Image: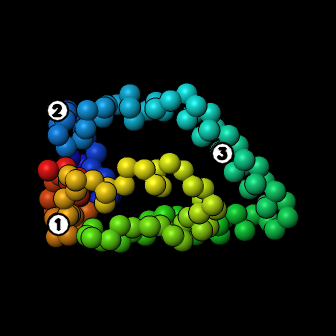
């Protein structure tokens, strides 16, 4: 296991694939390729419009505005609540990027709170994994 301290655990190259921990479709190809061709098109279009928006704000407000927005986005994207009963919402980051207005199917379908197999996460184990003191997923989601 890589001890990066990030919220997700990554596999090292020589390690065997643990299906119960990482899922059936977790592979190098799955990390590199998008799940669907339409997803790649949507991602490419969103990146194009983000670059166009950055160009426009730089022309109007100067380059310091974009640098400040990038720094704020980095800070807000790293903020997370400790593992426990309440999930992290990333409200500041969503407000800054404008994704609060996007309402997709993942916002109302397949919520983990509605599942019969939901296990309440162990906060102490989650913090040990986040700090690199323990191995495994932060929050096991199935019995």
- The answer to whether residue 20 is left or right of residue 48 is left
Is label 1 in a helix, a strand or a loop? loop
Does residue 137 show up? no
**What label does residue 29 carry, if any?**
none
- Front in this rendered view, residue 73 or 98: 98
Residue 113: x and y in percent read 31, 60
Does residue 85 show up? yes
Q: Residue at x 20, y 52 (%)?
A: 117
Mark 1 or 3, nearer chain start:
3
Q: Which residue is mark 3?
A: 46
Q: Nearer the viewer, mark 2 or mark 3?
A: 3
Residue found farthest to the right:
60
- Front in this rendered view, residue 140 or 46: 140
- Say if 110 sits above or below 84 in the image: above
Q: Residue at x 50, y 48 (%)?
A: 105
**What label does residue 16 carry, if any?**
2
- Say if 82 sits above or below 108 in the image: below
How many numbered markers are drawn?
3
Residue 64: x and y in percent read 72, 68
Q: How is the image coloured?
A: rainbow
Pointer 2 local density, CA inside 10 Å: few below 14, some 14–19, many at least 20: few
Mark 2 or 3, nearer chain start:
2
Q: Residue at x 20, y 70 (%)?
A: 123
Label 3 near label 1: C-beta < 8 Å?
Answer: no
Q: Which residue is mark 1?
A: 122
């Amino acid at each position: 296991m890589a001890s990066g301290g990030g919220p997700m655990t990554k596999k090292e190259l020589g390690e065997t694939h643990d299906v119960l921990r990482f899922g059936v479709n977790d592979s190098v190809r799955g990390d590199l390729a998008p799940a669907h061709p339409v997803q790649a098109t949507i991602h490419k279009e969103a990146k194009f419009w983000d670059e166009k928006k950055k160009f426009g704000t730089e022309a109007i407000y100067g380059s310091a505005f974009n640098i400040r927005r990038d720094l704020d986005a980095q800070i807000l994207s790293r903020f997370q609540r400790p593992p426990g009963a309440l999930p992290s919402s990333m409200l500041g980051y969503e407000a800054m990027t404008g994704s609060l207005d996007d309402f997709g199917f993942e916002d109302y379908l397949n919520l983990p709170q509605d599942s019969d197999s939901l296990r309440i996460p162990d906060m102490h184990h989650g913090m040990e994994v986040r700090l690199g003191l323990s191995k495994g997923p932060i929050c096991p989601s199935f019995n």
